[in-house]
Amino acid sequence: MPVHKNAYRKSFLLIIIFLVLISVTFVVALFVSYNLTAKYVENEFGSKKIEVLEQTIKPYYDFYQNKIPEITSYQGFLDSASAAKYATSVFHDYKFVRKVVFYDVLIGSKTPVTIRRNNLNISVKAVYIYWHKKGKVFGARQVAPADESDFKEMAVKLNNYIAFSDTSRVSTQDELFKTFWDVKPDKISYTNILRHEDIKIYRDLQQHNTLSASYKQNMMTFYLDPYLLKIRNPHHELYQNVSIQPVVYDPIDTEGDKMITEVSFPGAFSDYKLFFSSEQGYLTNEINKRFMPIGAVVLLISLFLVLIGWLIYRNLNVNIKLFKLQYDFINNFTHEFKTPVSVIKIAGSNLRGDGELTERQRKQYGKILDEEADKLNELMNKLLSFTQLENKSITLKKEEIVIDDFVSRYTDTFKIKYPDFKLHCKVVGVQTFYTDPVLLGSVFQNLIENAYKYSHPQKKELNINITHEKRNIVFSFVDKGIGIPKEELNNIFKKFYRIENQYNQNGSVGLGLAFCKELVNFMDGEITVHSKVNEGSEFRVTLPYEN
């Protein structure tokens, strides 16, 4: 019965739509991920500048918070020698400090440079200037400060603090900062912080106006150069160039195709800023570098989806083939049963008829019934044996067989059955063999039957060669039949599988070769095939040799 082609439909349009959808999704995902990566890099360009600022200004914060307050630990007893030593350590650790001015201050005494407030004198005894050049520190003494404004401003704040501070409590950090610090562009002035006992002594001086008594106080002014700060850029991938510029620096009209950003310095460097610039191509390289792993992930996900689609398609394809095999099996099996059943039905009807039958007719009908019953029995036995083999419910019954006699039984039978079938057998190097004759006979019967069935009418020929190779015995069945296409070689031993050709339209359920393979495997052997279309096929059965 021919199979309708529309029984096994494959929607190639659906496959194409799926592939197009995956491709479009892949392209869109790449486009979106690239734009998001570019936006992320641009956002980092604007935000990571704070980290560069923090790393660059870190020495300044350390100088401001730790080094300058060391002056307080001297409690006003710094002299020119100790001040020079202190200045040397400053120049060594903080390169951006270009000059230090040390004021040796007296409270209660009157000198040429004196600030008098609230009945208390604060005066300068001497001024020392320290600077460095090419790693060397230099110093000089002055009678009066070159810039009296720094001293006067700090003296006024100190005088007011002595007069009006609340000694019953600890001064706040804001109060201390406003009194003992003075931060201006490019310089910081500092006076050592007074203790409560010192404040009480100075207030006694205010009340009694004792000019003969005097107490030492230290004041320093640090002159800073922001251009001596070492720029630390932990994000070279974002910022191509980082420089220190004045706050008023505005190069927008001259930068061209560049991305720029900036951030101002704090404190004494507030007149300056960090200026960042990167060419567009520089950032594009960074975007591409970050996009590569993202693109690879998108590609892997797309390939994974394609793989899932292919697995689904393969599963459906296998199911379709299984459906086709089952469909063909039912059709052919039905046909195999229908023909002998029909013949048996006709013969039985004739035997049961009212007319008398001659002896010859009776024998003829009996022969027909016997042959058709044998066909049905053979088919049922094959199915039953196949099931037993798969379930391992049979056992090998080995016995010694004479190879020539064993083969002759089958070749003689097929010569009688098919007079036009040319069968030749050649045995080399082996006479007897221990095996199960029933199982091996089934292999012979199926392979010889296939050789005749799938050969052209003019080339019904089969050569059986039996040889002894090492520890194996090899049975070679070489025909000159229609051959097997190369793409079908991996499928011919599958159960219910049939090759579509003009010799295989009816009368086969696709069990013969699958049955042979199961038998050979059960006997611990191997069956292989070599074939060329229109030239013939060779089936080689290799079994362990036991004598």
Image: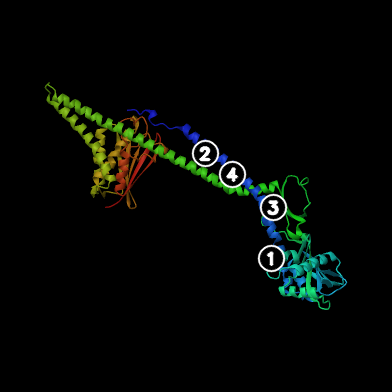
Report the label total: 4
Q: Which residue is mark 4?
A: 33
Q: Which residue is mark 1?
A: 172
Q: Tag 1: residue type?
A: Thr
Q: Nearer the viewer, residue 542 or 499?
A: 499
**In this view, 55 is above or below 3:** below
Q: Position of residue 15 (x, y in %)?
A: 47, 35
Helix, strand or loop at disc 4? helix
* Cα separation between marks 1 and 4: 53 Å
The local crowd at label 1, few if under 14, some if 14 to 19, many if 20 or more residues have their Cα within 10 Å, is: few
Closer to the camera: disc 4 or disc 2?
A: 4
The local crowd at label 2, few if under 14, some if 14 to 19, many if 20 or more residues have their Cα within 10 Å, is: some
Helix, strand or loop at disc 3? loop
Is 390 displayed left or right of 205 in the figure? left
- What's the residue at 33%, 30% (across, down)? 505
**In this view, 522 is above or below 62:** above
Q: Which residue is mark 2?
A: 22
Q: Tag 4: residue type?
A: Ser
